[in-house]
């Protein structure tokens, strides 16, 4: 349908097995995502795209370790292993992903002082990526989200999509999660409560 789009979230090497921030089974979704790409007219991708030394990396905070949290000017921030550094092999899309059909790639997390989970906003919840405007200009009203990780970038993107007025669904079979301290159950509940269709 002309008013529908598939949004593929962060299906990159560093989030797949063997990567710097691997999501268990992250590569398993590639064939299904490719099938959805083939069957969808409008396809968009997001790409985590951090400069070296990004503020969300534990290595940027002496004495801190990955998966600890700190307070940043925009709120609580989980610290991550160094990942998806601009131009690195880890930042590339999975080699099996048939993404050449994509109309747009939104790069996020490139501002050194702020992280970005959502396809729509930085983690300050106010700085836009420009995706909403692109979709509105194209008269796209319905979104299906897939990718990595269910409980972080997929979930935050879905919550923002609903808040912005898009009819939003998440294909759970085409996602994989991290589940950090119960984050899967928590974020699935938040999406359900917000009106995201979990398929």
Image (spheres, grey):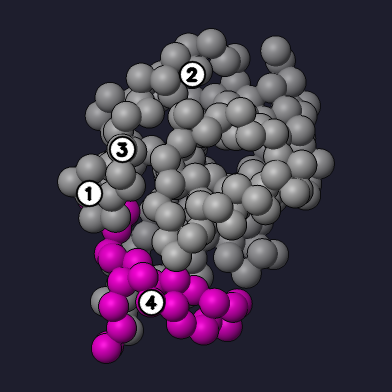
* Sequence-earlier tag: 2 or 1: 1
Find the distance from the CA under tag 3 to the CA under tag 1. 12 Å
- Magenta region: 62-90
Q: Measured along the vertical axis of the image, is residue 20 above or below residue 125?
A: above
Residue at the far right: name it: 165
Pick the quarter of the image with the C terminus: top right
Specify which label sits upstream in the sequence, 2 or 3: 3
Q: Which one is earlier in the sequence, the residue at label 4 or at label 2?
A: 2
In which image quadrant can residue 131 be found? top right
Compared across the picture, whether 34 is left or right of 81 comes to right
Q: Is residue 67 magenta?
A: yes
Mark 2 in CB contact with mark 3 (< 8 angstroms): no
Q: Is residue 57 visible?
A: no
Image position of 114 with respect to 182: above or below = below
Residue displayed at 59% across by 14% down: 41
**Disc nearer the start of the sequence (3/4):** 3
What secondary structure is the stretch in magenta mostly built from?
loop
Residue 49, position in %: x, y? 39, 53
SS at badge 1: loop
For the residues bearing labels 3 and 1, Cβ distance under 8 angstroms? no
Q: Which mark is residue 25?
A: 3
> Residue beneath label 1, please?
19
Q: Is residue 180 left or right of residue 131?
A: left
What residue sits right under mark 2 in the picture?
Answer: 37
Q: Nearer the viewer, residue 151 or 165?
A: 151
Q: CA distance from mark 4 to mark 2?
A: 36 Å
Upstream in the sequence, badge 4 or badge 1?
A: 1
Residue that label 4 marks? 68
Magenta segment includes 166: no
């Amino acid at each position: 349908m002309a008013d529908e789009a598939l949004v593929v979230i962060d299906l990159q090497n560093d989030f797949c097995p063997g990567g710097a921030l691997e999501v268990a089974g992250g590569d398993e979704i590639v064939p299904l995502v490719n099938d959805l790409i083939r069957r969808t007219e409008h396809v968009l991708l997001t790409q985590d795209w951090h400069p070296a030394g990004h503020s969300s990396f534990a290595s940027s905070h002496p004495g801190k370790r990955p998966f600890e949290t700190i307070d940043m000017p925009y709120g609580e921030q989980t610290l991550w292993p160094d990942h998806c550094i601009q131009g690195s092999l880890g930042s590339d899309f999975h080699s099996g992903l048939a993404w050449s059909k994509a109309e747009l790639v939104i790069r996020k997390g490139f501002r050194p002082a702020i992280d970005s989970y959502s396809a729509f906003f930085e983690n300050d919840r106010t700085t836009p990526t420009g995706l909403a405007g692109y979709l509105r200009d194209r008269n796209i009203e319905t979104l299906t989200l897939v990718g990595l990780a269910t409980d972080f970038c997929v979930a935050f993107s879905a919550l923002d999509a609903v808040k912005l007025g898009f009819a939003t669904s998440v294909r759970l079979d085409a996602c994989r999660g991290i589940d950090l301290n119960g984050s899967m159950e928590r974020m699935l509940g938040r999406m359900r409560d917000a009106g995201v269709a979990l398929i």
